[in-house]
Image: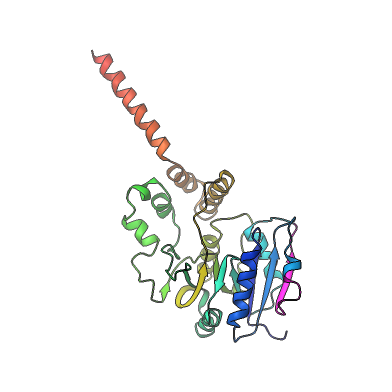
Amino acid sequence: MGNVKVSIVILRYKEIGEVINCLNSIKKVNPRLSFEVILVDNNKKKRIINKVRGKYSWLRYVKSPGNIGFDRGNNLGAKYAKGEYLLFLNPDTLVLPKAIDKLSGFLDKNHKTGVVAPNLIDEKGKVFLQLGSRALTPIRGIVAHSFINKIFPNNPISRSYWLKDIPMDKLREVDVVPGSALMIRRNVFERIGGFDENFFIYFEESDLCKRVKEEGCRIFIIPQARIVHYWEPKTKNRRLNKEFEKSRLYYFKKHYGIFWALVVEAFARFSKEHAIFLGFLLLYILFALIILQL
């Protein structure tokens, strides 16, 4: 295959059809640069190999032991990569014309940039509102990831965290980009040790980008590159909720210590049900005090 400019790593777990659509979109846009696709199959029972064998000359199929998680799966794919740049791409995406070329070209011209990402859009062409963020600090976690944001969604801390003060049709320097489509220099990825495999899913991009910034690299989202993401809010799933909480706790413990991790969790896990219970408890105490005064 010669020198490879971009290695595209796609991690597949469930759907087969969406992966085929993603691969076909890459084939259709036919990037001008040299590229390869490394497809990591994270489903132990229903492999996808027979659906892709011989159809894509630039595809390398990697079989994982099973569902080893987002971080371990992408690290596994990166081990086979030959490209100067790594593009980690969700399977539920469609690559639009020139997106890969523009991402790669931006890194070519901006040597202090370590990570670059596209504008993620829905099937109607609308840019997703929560696209990139500033660094996830304890204060931002307490406000943006808790009941406070639900009660006061336009509070200044959440607005700043979710970059609502920056036009989405402009070049934006950010602290964190979505893990569903990000391109990173391979030498930077290797220098920071890749994805932290203590995460199974969730918060891995916040952790990765934080370490990239600590290396002195810049991070950008460029609107000229666009990728369709068929993202839908995940339905309530007890296992996924547990993974989300576990990853959030680990992220804050790793970067800010156990004290701040526990403080963030106390606010983040405070639900409407907790508020109702606390309200009834306070009313009970109030009535008890009134009766004692009679």
Quadrant housing residue 281: top left
Task: Name the residue at the top extreme.
Answer: 294
* Residue 137 visible in the shown view: yes
Image point (71%, 77%), residue name: 56
Closest to the observer, 232 or 269: 232
Query: Is residue 262 placed above or below 117 in the rendered structure?
Result: above
In the rendered structure, which segment of residues is drawn in magenta? 52-65
Q: What residue is at 53 percent from the left and 77 percent from the top?
A: 96
Residue 292: x and y, percent?
28, 14
Q: Residue 86 or 257: which is nearer the viewer?
A: 86
Left or right of residue 66: residue 164: left
Quarter of the figure with the C terminus = top left
Q: Residue at x 66, y 79 (%)?
A: 83
Foreground residue among 115 and 167: 167
Query: How has the structure been colored for display?
Result: rainbow
Left or right of 284? Residue 100 is right
Horizontal and vertical percent for residue 137?
A: 44, 56
| Magenta run includes residue 258 | no
Residue 90 percent across, percent down from the top left:
59, 66
Q: Quadrant of residue 132?
A: bottom left
Taking the magenta stretch, the answer to whether it contains residue 62 is yes
Q: Describe residue 161's horizontal placement relative to residue 81 as left or right.
A: left
On screen, residue 42 above or below 292: below
